[in-house]
Amino acid sequence: MNKQDKQYFDCVIAGGGIAGLVTALELVENSDKTVCIIDRDTKERLGGLARWAFGGMALCNTKEQKRGKIEDSVGLMLNDWHQFAQFEPQDDWPRAWAKEYAQHNHEKVYCWLHKLGLGFLPAVNWVERGLFGDGNSVPRYHVLWGTGWELVERVITTLRPYIAKGQLSYLHQHKVQHPLFEQGKICGAGVLNEQTAQSFELATQRLIIACGGINGAVKQVRKNWYQAWGDAPLEILNGANPISDGALHQEIASAGGVLTHSDKMWNYAAGIDHPQAEFEGHGLSLIPSKSALWLNHRGERIGPMPLVTGFDTRYLCEQVSKQEKPWTWQVMNWKIAKKELAVSGSMHNPSIRDKKLLGLLKETLFGNERLVKQLADQSQDFLIADNLEMLAAKMNTLTAQDYIQADEMAQQVAQYDAQLRRGEAFENDEQARRITHARQWKVDKLRTCKSQPIVDNKAGPLIAIRLRLISRKSLGGIQTNLQSQVLNSQGSWINGLYSVGEAAGFGGGGASGLRSLEGTFLSGCILTARNAAQSILNNN
């Protein structure tokens, strides 16, 4: 294929992540349109970050909720969404997409996934409750049985017959460089073969931007850092894909598209160096333990509000980013780690990914010994010792400076442990109160220790994990209407141009506002993709 060929497709999709794949699937299943997916990654990595995702989705009015006697509704979800998002006055399209999600996640995501042959674990998790009850009022976090890996594989498998009949094409290790216009309408796309450095053009009347966000480039994370938090940490790990670098976003802006809320991001506070790093700065995102003490670089407890996961991820990131050094510590024992510590993603959750029910039940009931041993063996950020003095020495060795005084850290730990040992009736610590509250929900009770001191001869050895901020998802992006059509500064559609998934801020250029209810990303990709496809089908 060269410049002279200028092959024509009815639709060209820039990006082979889950948003791009679902858009293609909806188009080829419901029409005879020809579609070309242009993806920067290799064939084996088709599916983007969704392939490596845990597979959690925020859904309401589901069978799983009803079986768990969870009373949810569209109105309750939307109210929670607005409280957590803290939309700005001009956020008309983000508000519209929040309403679209609340009203249609059951039909357009949950039921669609079941029709595809996918299902969810019966236990519904309660995450992002908000620091003061301003997040999810009820449990909504549904985990795909098979994780994001199964979702991607199922969609790719469903698409294969359309490749055979010539309706669908892929261009791997290629990227869309810019849209092409004729009389104000999309007429094609400039494409680069990243293996040969050869550029060429494809002709099309519909270009769908599904290139992901900007958080795969730490440079972009720093450039768009939320100014109210001050300077970005000196070190930020990369938990996204480096090919999501924001370059195509800028091309869309140059073509008249509106970019909004680029400083709104969904990063995480508990990243470690990836033991199997694939690029410089590659990080692995942990789901930190509630019962661990979260300490600064000097071994002092971060406060006055202690950091406890599961309530407000953005708050955790804010507090971590404001610390004097770019790393923090979680200190715990083996018992806590075995019961509570987890890693976000499909690769570190093989029991769920591979649908091994017995293995999942064993890990849930008796603790995930396999994961703790794996991290201990593979991660330099994961330290083990028999006492706090030895642990402090290892922590100082890792950071190459004696920031931590063992006796001072021991005092912090002893103070916390002492009030736990006095009994639940006398626990007067915000972290202990939040743990007690979390355990009231049966799903969290299975994965959270009850009043577990750090120093406990029956629960050792002791563990310290060095954590850093890790980039993940962009909450802002290309502004779109409810048909996923890209809008210009006058609020009009740029004819033939669409954007879906993270590239569009999961709808409207920022559907989550400041904070996500968590689990609105994979599902947001599906929702925006299906809306885009339906719009294309309706407009021929």
Image (tube, rainbow, N blue to C red):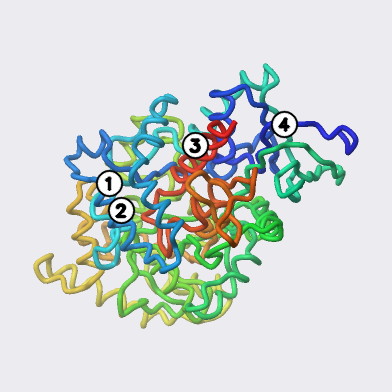
- The residue sitting at 27% across, 61% down in the picture is 457
In the rendered structure, find residue 277 and report the number of the disc placed on it. Answer: none
Asked if marks 4 and 2 touch (Cβ < 8 Å), the reply is no
- Asked if residue 372 shows in the view, the reply is no
**Within-10-Å neighbours for mark 2: few <14, some 14–19, many 20+:** some
Query: Where residue 321 sits in the image (x, y, percent)?
Result: 48, 74
Query: Mark 4 falls on what kind of element?
Result: loop
Q: How far apart are marks 3 and 2 (CA)?
A: 20 Å
Task: Identify the image quadrant of the C terminus.
Answer: top right
- The residue sitting at 61% across, 70% down in the picture is 222
Mark 3 and mark 4 lie on one chain; the one further toward the N terminus is 4
Q: Distance between the residues labelled 1 and 3?
A: 20 Å
Q: In this view, does 100 lie above or below 145?
A: below
Q: Mark 4 points at which residue?
A: 9
Q: In this view, does 37 lie above or below 484?
A: above
In the drawing, does residue 35 fall left or right of residue 399? right
Query: Mark 3 falls on what kind of element?
Result: helix
Mark 1 and mark 3 lie on one chain; the one further toward the N terminus is 1
Q: What residue type is labelled 4?
A: Phe
In the drawing, does residue 190 fall left or right of residue 344? right
Residue 252, by quadrant, is: bottom right
In the drawing, does residue 425 fall left or right of residue 306? left
In the rendered structure, find residue 530 and report the number of the disc placed on it. Answer: 3
Mark 3 and mark 2 lie on one chain; the one further toward the N terminus is 2
Q: Which amino acid does label 2 sit on?
A: Leu
Query: Mark 2 falls on what kind of element?
Result: helix
Asked if marks 2 and 1 touch (Cβ < 8 Å), the reply is yes
